[in-house]
Image: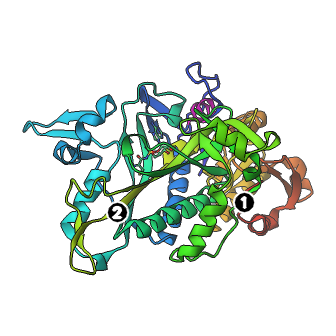
Amino acid sequence: MRMTRYFLPVLREIPSEAQITSHKLMLRAGMIKQAVSGIYSWMPLGLRVLQKIERIVIEEQERAGHIPLLMPTIQPASLWQKSGRYDDYGEEMLRIRDRHNRDLLYGPTNEELITEIFSSHVKSYRDLPLTLFHIQWKFRDEMRPRFGVMRGREFLMKDGYNFDIDMDAAIHSYNRHMVSYLKTYERLGLKAIPMRADTGPIGGKYSHEFLVLADTGESEVFFDKRILNYNFGISELNFDDIDECQSIVDKWTIPYARTDETHDQETFDREVSQEHQGISRAIEVGQIFYFGTKYSEPMGALVTNSEGMHVPVHMGSHGIGVSRLVGAIIEAYHDEKGIKWPIVVAPYKVGIINAVMGDKESCEVSERIYNELNNANLEPIYDDRDERAGSKFNTMELIGIPWRITVGPRGLKKGVVELTNRYNGDRVEVPTGNIVNTMNKMGDCILD
Ligand code: 5CA
């Protein structure tokens, strides 16, 4: 992308309405624009990051054997009346009436809709297990939308739903989700800790939230600090292996880790010695639930079991806050100059700065490097604007591009350009003919 052709509405001033770093940086970097409280347009740079996160989430869901589909944002109220949640959900639900006086709603979550889809088509235990997921916009009329995309009213969620013949099978689905989530967050460069959680309006027996420690987080969490040394680090995994998934879940869930809703000081003191007790703020980036037959029973989602009896399926639902993750990643990866994207979600991987626009050779070499990087799929963004070099550096640092190539007459005399790492500031000189090779060698390191 050439900056002269792009739409990158960066702000010079720190927006006064933003309280936390990620919100400030997303506005300053021209990633989002508020339409009305808690509802945002995603500007081109923000959209690229959002889509990179989506891609990783989808890859990991598919790797775990989960099947993508797409449900609508608008749902009929009648389905929610069947499950009994239409009245329970209260003011958070945006209720709509169409021209035929039919009651509709903008989905805050999709348990009812997916249960109806399932029950219309699946009738036998032979078609189980099944897990369906989508990434779709949700609306919750939050009392206090705040912190930008962290607590929006309209937000993007990956929500998945498992259907199993009995509780044991559904627990394996729960475990499979936990494992796939651990892997997803790790790929995104985040340390997300599963913590025992309340089930809230989704309901059910078991639930874990995934929390990323951050001073600006909305949740208060209590945990055994030793869990911070855990790394997922598994590349090959058989998601159908019940014991393998269970042992990963045990490893991550046996140490004490709870949100304030489920925290119990007595148990905390008994299980964790003072020196290992951790208390922190944290951002909830996902939650998984097992709720048995809570929806399948009232909604008639029955299948025949191996004995020919009609039984309600066991279900769970599993959510990742995709738009919230953009904010959570920025909270974890920034400095006083701006964002420092992990390369896997960076909107562009390499920023090219032509330091002296009036210099013919600098222009030619910048153009050539830009074309080479584009052809090699290294996603360059080229600052070809007629601006001071200092201002170009500031923009590139603000928007968090992991690598920067600076092209200028001084280096070109020696046949080199300067390659700078946004993460640690390291600089090296690279011969102008060797850029693609060098960048390829840097690989997809996560920059930690
Ligand atoms: N049906 C279940 C799982 S599919 C469900 O709705 N779970 S949830 O309520 O926990 O939401 C899943 C994730 O969406 C949360 O962990 C959080 O990361 C994200 N999320 C929830 N509310 C908001 C919000 N107002 N703004 C941004 N993200 C949100």
Rendering coords of residue 334 (x, y %)? 72, 39
Position above or below: 241 against 193: below
Q: Looking at mark 1, is its residue's CB closer than 8 Å to ligand 1?
A: no
Quarter of image, ligand 1:
top left
Q: Amino acid at mark 2?
A: His
Whether residue 212 is visible to the viewer of this picture, yes or no, is yes
Q: Looking at mark 2, is its residue's CB closer than 8 Å to ligand 1?
A: no
Q: What residue is shown with label 1?
A: 231
Q: Amino acid at mark 1?
A: Asn
Dominant SS of magenta comes to helix
Nearer-N-terminus badge (1/2): 1
At horizontal 41% and vertical 33% (from top left) the residue drawn is 153
Residue 160 shown in magenta: no
Rendering coords of residue 58 (x, y %)? 48, 62
At horizontal 40% and vertical 30% (from top left) the residue drawn is 142
Region of the chain picked out in magenta, as a range: 23-30
At horizontal 22% and vertical 66% (from top left) the residue drawn is 302
Residue 25 shown in magenta: yes
Position above or below: 306 against 254: below
Q: What residue is shown with label 2?
A: 314
**How was this image coloured?**
rainbow
